[in-house]
Amino acid sequence: MKTKIMAHRGASAYAPENSLESFALAIEMGAHGIELDIYETADGKLVIHHDDNIKRMTGIDAKISETDFATLRSYNFAGEGGEKFGFVKIPEFYEILDLFKPTDMTINIEMKEGSLGYIREIGELIREYKMEDQVMYSSFDHFKLLHIKEMNPRAYTGALYSYNMACPWDYAKAAGFTALHPSYDQIYKFKHEFGVDYIAEAHARGIEVNPWTANKPVIIQHLVEWGSDNIITDVPDIGLSKIDKV
């Protein structure tokens, strides 16, 4: 199967990350999917943002979980260098679903801090939109992925990690996860330190491999040649140019 390109927080090298502008640009570029991050506001709204604190993108020192949605919408999330986009609003999750519902693109949802209720609410909204087949769930908190599997045994689940894990493909198989989402350097470590083909080992056990966040053209090229299922990148246009050459 040909490698697919997933725009990390949208086309975030070119537009403010996790913004509607960044996601729309990923669609325009022809990416196969996008990756995003979800938090819950103080008044129970699901919003798209990477950090638990909004200071990096707004200059305002405030935690999402302690701030109501209306207040968050009053801040500009353009981030550093995003002035050309004007006033950038933090998106609500349903706005993302509205944007991608007409497409066949995959939405990779990275679940951040949140209760079991937060996980249920995400799943319920996706079911309401009838978009279960367009969604993959990922998290560094693998218990969240187990909860997702309890709620929907057919859900696509990807275990995010960046540390040195021995035999990650056996771990993913035992846990019942669909995929591994390693930092791309993990694939290099196995290949160059142990002579082990990470992706081949995972595929032999029915586990997909979706490395993050590969931005250098030579790294993207290697990951394509080695058979990555999806490559998560800030530069989807470069990623697409590499898979077109294979």
Image: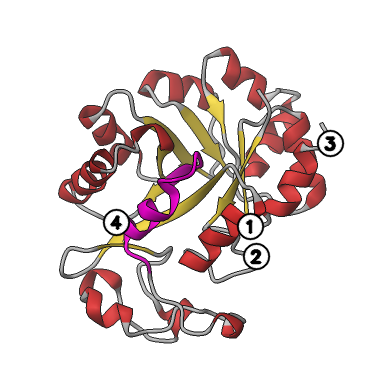
> How busy is the neighbourhood of tag 1: few (under 14 within 10 Å), some, or many (20 plus)?
many
Q: Residue at x 32, y 79 (%)?
A: 73
Q: Is residue 129 above or below residue 197?
A: below
Q: In x, y percent, where is residue 127? A: 25, 38
Left or right: 83 in relation to 44 = right
Foreground label between 2 and 3: 3
Distance of mark 1 from mark 2, alpha carbons?
Answer: 5 Å
Q: In x, y percent, where is residue 160? A: 47, 42
The amino acid pointed to by label 1 is: Asp
Please report the bounds of the magenta region as a residue range: 91-108
Foreground label between 1 and 4: 1
Is residue 6 or residue 171 the one in the foreground? Answer: 6
Q: What number is the disc on residue 13?
A: 2
Distance of mark 3 from mark 1, alpha carbons?
Answer: 19 Å
Is residue 166 or residue 66 the one in the foreground? Answer: 66
Q: Residue at x 78, y 30 (%)?
A: 225
The amino acid pointed to by label 3 is: Lys
Q: Is residue 71 above or below residue 176?
A: below
The residue labelled by disc 3 is 245
Q: Earlier in the sequence, mark 1 or mark 4?
A: 4
The residue labelled by disc 1 is 234
- How many circles with numbers are drawn on the protein? 4
Q: Quadrant of the N terminus?
A: top right
Distance of mark 4 from mark 3, alpha carbons?
Answer: 39 Å
The residue labelled by disc 4 is 113
Any part of residue 192 in sight: no
Distance of mark 1 from mark 4, alpha carbons?
Answer: 23 Å
Q: Are marks 1 and 2 in contact (CB under 8 Å)?
A: yes
204 is within the stretch colored magenta: no
